[in-house]
Amino acid sequence: MSPAFRLLTTLLGVSALSAATAALACWPIRHGPLGPRLLISGLFLATGLVTALPACFTRLSATTPGR
């Protein structure tokens, strides 16, 4: 698997999980004001991106068996 593909799958996977978590967290306040929903979504998405960067670097630096 190429490093670019591993980077892309890691970045998309972690970001997608973060977005899903934000959606679940915002579900109880879906009928409330927009401000808290945006704040919570932004915090979860920012956390996902901050988590995705080290995960990407770890996946890129990991050696695959057989190389």
Image (cartoon, rainbow, N blue to C red):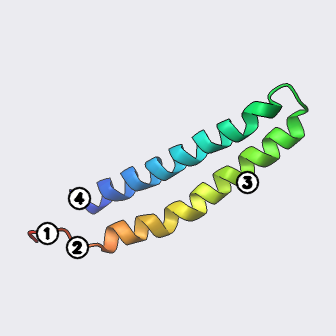
**Label 1, label 3: how far apart the Cα atoms are:** 37 Å
Residue hosting label 1: 65
Q: Is residue 2 placed above or below 22 in the rendered structure?
A: below
**Label 4, label 2: how far apart the Cα atoms are:** 12 Å
Q: Amino acid at mark 1?
A: Pro
Residue hosting label 3: 43
**Label 2, label 1: how far apart the Cα atoms are:** 7 Å
Q: Amino acid at mark 3?
A: Leu
Residue hosting label 4: 2
Where is residue 59 shown, x and y percent of the image?
35, 66
Q: Give neighbour class at mark 4: few <14, some 14-19, many 20+ (Cα, 10 Å).
A: few
Q: Residue at x 88, y 40 (%)?
A: 35
Q: Secondary structure at mark 2?
A: loop
Q: Secondary structure at mark 4?
A: loop
Residues 8 and 27: in front is 27
Name the residue furthest left: 66
- N-terminal of the pair, mark 3 or mark 2, is 3
Q: Secondary structure at mark 1?
A: loop
